[in-house]
Image (spheres, rainbow, N blue to C red):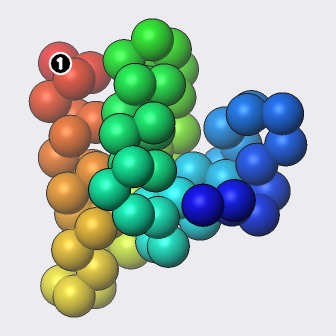
Amino acid sequence: MLHRHLNHQQYTLAAIDNIISRGGWEDWLKLRDAVLNNGSLLEKVQRICHAYVHDPYAQRYHFWKHYAKKHLA
């Protein structure tokens, strides 16, 4: 899936947000691989997810928030 704001495979905040909210399984696997290879992306994931944690139905963001927290520890 092509994601908006994803230019030259650079994971901007907008691109990460788009992948989490609209991406499928394969997109999430690519994001997972990217964050495992570049720890600074985990901080970006946390920043994105922090904006959505007040919504109990934003389960995708809750998942990624916990994933990033676990891997930053």
Image spot of residue 14 (x, y percent): 69, 58
Residue reaching furthest to the right: 7
Left or right: 70 with respect to 30?
A: left
On screen, 17 above or below 7?
below
Asked whether the viewer can see residue 32, the reply is yes
Residue at figure coordinates x 69%, y 59% from the top left: 2
Q: Amino acid at mark 1?
A: Ala
Left or right: 29 with respect to 69?
A: right
Residue at figure coordinates x 39%, y 49% from the top left: 26
Image spot of residue 54 (x, y percent): 29, 80
How dense is the environment of label 1, judged by Cα within 10 Å: few (below 14), some, or many (20 and up)? Answer: few
Residue linked to disc 1: 73
Asked whether the viewer can see residue 50, the reply is no
- State the quadrant of the N terminus: bottom right
Residue at figure coordinates x 46%, y 71% from the top left: 21
Image spot of residue 30 (x, y percent): 45, 36
